[in-house]
Amino acid sequence: MRCVWYVSEFVEGNFLGLPEGQGTPDVAILSVPYELTSSYGQGSNEGPKATIAASAQVELYDALLPEDLPCGFQIRTAEAWNGEGGTLQEQLSGICEYVTPYLTSSFPVILGGEHGMLPAIISAVSEGINLKDLTIVQIDAHADLRDELEGDSFSHACAIRRSLDLGVGQVLQIGIRAFAREEIEFADNDGRVQSWFARDILNPCGGEAAWRKWLDTLSRISGPVWLTLDMDGLDPAYVPTTGTPVPGGLAYWQVVEIIEKIATASDAKWIGADINEIVPDPNNNVTEFTAAMLATKIVSTYLASLLRDEQ
């Protein structure tokens, strides 16, 4: 049985304002303010800090947990990645080194930063598992399957393609609604990629059936799972400032349902998540607050799964 303790101290600069506990954290909140290849909107490098600040306004209660967060667990806010490295490859190597220590004993929730950080994260993941066993669940407006964009093969638009190059076994995409012919052809010819397009799951005629099929697919995942959540996967009504906003996206509660479905897939082992393309707006806090809400939902849902496993 876990010893439940109550939060009596708010710590500014920590996720949810939670004080640091002793020992190895169950959940580590990592900040990667990386932005080198953004091709449209700028400012995702400010996303992690803004999201942690917004989390101060998020409630600690979740119906999945018997007590308020941290519910007897250790949640640690790590120091942010320092951004050292002159070249793109040096920065990606730095991200890999930053993430690696938290993968063996904690559940990392990584706040970004542009989506181009994903291959570095997956490279870190590869040090602990065989990537052919890994499923990436991708919530995104974009397929991110280009081989290059504007001459850059490590652009944010290539994040999933480069992750597949590392040997990832399966990618399940949801919310896709902006893509090039090249990406469709690649997905059609690579059996590792399954795409659920926004137009299909949000269609008033038949959309519910497509959505249920997607959830059923999630429930049957086996092996290690990584969730990569690009904020532009949601409709701009929920995230008005992202790197490349696209109308016609997922609703907030649909994303919550995806998170909860991953955590309850009986044969899956959820090993971590990243939330990227968080672009704060000083005149509108909606995007970073939505990111903070979703990060909290990821944390509480993961911890609820640990409690189920203890029973």
Image (spheres, rainbow, N blue to C red):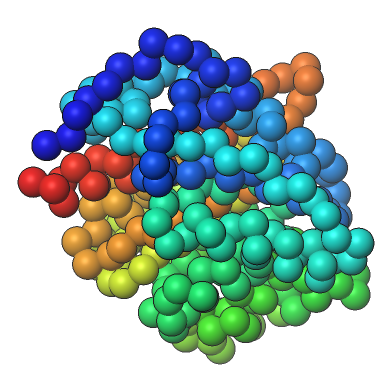
User: Which quarter of the rendered picture does the N terminus lie within?
Assistant: top left
Q: Considering only vertical position in the picture, is 166 above or below 272?
A: below
**In the rendered image of this protein, does residue 202 appear above or below residue 294?**
below
Would you say residue 200 is visible in this rendering?
no
Q: Farthest residue toward the bottom?
A: 189
In this rendered view, identify the residue nearer to me: 256 or 67: 67
Q: Which quadrant would residue 266 be assigned to in this image?
A: bottom left
Where residue 179 appears, as percent x and y from the top left, is 68, 65
Residue 305: x %, y % from top left: 24, 47
Q: How many marks?
A: 0
Q: Is residue 271 left or right of residue 310?
A: right
In the image, farthest residue toward the top: 8
Res 160 → quadrant: bottom right
Residue 66 left/right relative to 170: left
Give 54 or 218, whichever is nearer the viewer: 54
Q: Is residue 25 above or below residue 119?
A: above
Residue at 18% x, 34% y: name it. 2
- Where is residue 227? Give x, y as percent: 47, 56
User: Residue 16 appears at what percent x and percent y?
Assistant: 49, 24
Residue at image position (45%, 12%) is 9
Residue at image position (64%, 57%) is 98
Residue plotted at (89% across, 66% down): 87
In the image, residue 213 sits, relative to residue 201, either above or below, namely below
Q: Toward the viewer: 46 or 174?
A: 46
Residue 230 in sight in this render = yes
For residue 123, side relative to residue 260 (left or right) = right
